Image: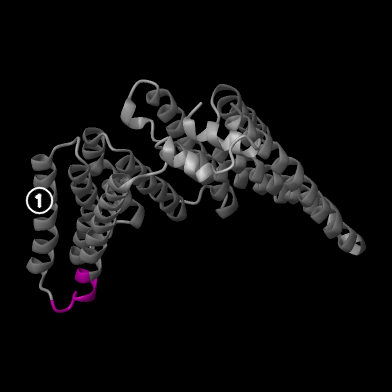
Amino acid sequence: MSDRHDILAWSAAGAVTDARAALRVAGVTPDARAWRHFLDRLLLWSGALSLAAAVVFFVAYNWTDLGRIARFAIVDVLVLVAVLGYGRLGADTAAGKACLLVASILLGALLALFGQTYQTGADTWELFANWAALMAPWVLMGRFAGLWMLWTAVANVAIVLYFQVFPGLFGVLFGTERVLWLLFGFNTLALLTWEIAATRLDWLRERWAACLLATASGITVTMLAVHAIFDWRASSGLALPAYGIWLAAVYRQYRVRQRDLFVLSGACLSIIVVIASLLGNNLVRGRGAALGYLMTAAAVIVLGVVLGRWLQQLAREDTTP
């Protein structure tokens, strides 16, 4: 148990009267050096993202004034400078990782510029698929969680855009379920791989990345369950069983094996959404619609209170010495 949790628990029990002073004496609160480190990182990453966005907006705004060679020269040179900066600064430095992140973002801008300039006729999903494929070596080389999240986001967009072009044999509804299944499988596999690899690789132990993957997996499986409830005729019938299995797996992993209140909170919210959808679909009908709305709202309130208290109990367990 960390010193911070111990002090907060003692303060809640009344054993410590001035928790802030106790935290300062224990060295838990950030000092001037820690604040400088935080501001340094904040300015570094915000500056890197702002630079990449500025290049995209600059080329787009001055499209008619810039010639074809000038547009390509600006983006190509900046990609080259970013890659050289990464090689100069090293993979283990924050500045080097920021350079690789900028290069990866500008790579997507370069592909979009190529397609817009030469009008290749390729679909939008191909842009993102090629972006993910070309960026993959840098992602594998970078050992940087943020770059992996960028690659995952690009791959998700490519999947969604692909199914907008090819919705499926039986129309848009069937295509909607297919894309949700593929997104759910992709993000769940990414989360599983991340959690397993994090036990061996220190740089993968940043919990925010795992939480993002868990959120993506949870959103898609929740959408699958809601889709199965409101349109069961177009559903394959596997969404609700898969949803139950997902909840059991989340409980086992993030409640039994390791504690992650963020993921558990998301699962609780998902339960409320699915149950409210189930009640609303079956109770809000005809003359009894008003009563159905009332019962659905009451169920949401009760579930919110029960699950909220359960999460509070878990949080207290984390802070109990």
**Of 82 and 36, the residue lying toward us:** 36
Residue lying at 32% horizontally and 49% vertically, measured from the top left: 35
The quadrant where residue 57 appears: bottom left
User: Where is 80 relative to 309, above or below?
Assistant: below
- Can residue 178 be seen here? The reply is no
State the residue position of label 1.
Answer: 80
Q: Is residue 218 left or right of residue 37?
A: right
Residue 141 placement (x, y as % from top left) = 21, 34
Left-right relation of 119 to 211 = left
Mark 1 nearby-residue class (10 Å; few <14, some 14–19, many ≥20): few
Query: In the rendered structure, which segment of residues is drawn in magenta?
Result: 58-65
For residue 314, side relative to residue 57 (left or right) = right
Of 237 and 254, the residue lying toward us: 254
What residue type is disc 1 on? Leu
Q: Where is 71 relative to 259, above or below?
A: below
- For this orientation, the residue located farthest to the bottom is 65
Q: Position of residue 9 (x, y in %)?
A: 60, 34
Badge 1 marks a residue whose secondary structure is helix
Q: Is residue 55 left or right of residue 207?
A: left
Count of numbered marks: 1
- Res. 217 visible in picture: yes
Residue 199 image point, x, y percent: 40, 22
Q: Residue at x 46, y 55 (%)?
A: 164
For the C terminus, the image quarter is top right
Out of 118 and 89, give the one closest to the viewer. Answer: 89
